[in-house]
Amino acid sequence: MVKHVIVWTLKDEYSAQEKAEIKKGIKEGLEGLKGKVPGLEEIKVYTEGLASSNGDLMLDSTLTDEEALKGYAVHPAHVDVANNKVRPFVKQRSCFDMIV
């Protein structure tokens, strides 16, 4: 199994209300990929971090193996969500992938 974890920081230009709507869209879009992307076992987006967090939201996903992770990266449903619900609003992205 492979864990794919991402932490995003949204652009500063958005109000708290706009950020809440953006986070909702990202969560719905990414969690909606379950059952659509081969090898994607679990996917969860956390949008309510503690005040000590330095990111705005986090993706925690589990895939069957590294090949599934590679496939996820280029799967049309994932690319659509990334291009329309994530990338336009994000100023920073950190990723950590590991075998578990």
Image (cartoon, rainbow, N blue to C red):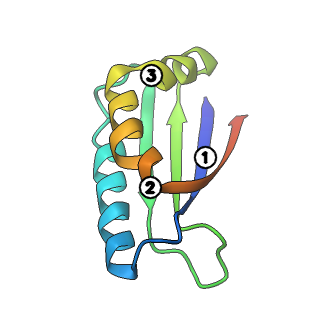
Q: Residue at x 60, y 46 (%)?
A: 5
Q: Position of residue 6 (x, y in %)?
A: 59, 48
- The answer for how far apart the CA atoms under marks 1 and 3 are is 16 Å
Q: Residue at x 53, y 37 (%)?
A: 62
Q: Residue at x 59, y 21 (%)?
A: 65
Q: Position of residue 19 (x, y in %)?
A: 39, 70
Front residue of this view, candidates 69 and 99: 69
Q: Residue at x 39, y 79 (%)?
A: 15
- Residue 80: numbered disc: none
Is disc 1 surrounded by few (<14), some (14 to 19) or many (20+) residues within 10 Å? some
Say whether residue 22 is left or right of residue 62: left
Secondary structure of residue under mark 2:
helix
Front residue of this view, candidates 3 and 81: 81
Circle 3 residue: 39
Circle 1 residue: 5
Circle 2 residue: 89
- The answer for how far apart the CA atoms under marks 2 and 1 are is 18 Å
Task: Looking at this view, name the residue that lies furthest to the bottom.
Answer: 51
- The answer for how far apart the CA atoms under marks 2 and 3 are is 27 Å
Q: Is residue 100 visible?
A: no
Q: Position of residue 8 (x, y in %)?
A: 56, 57
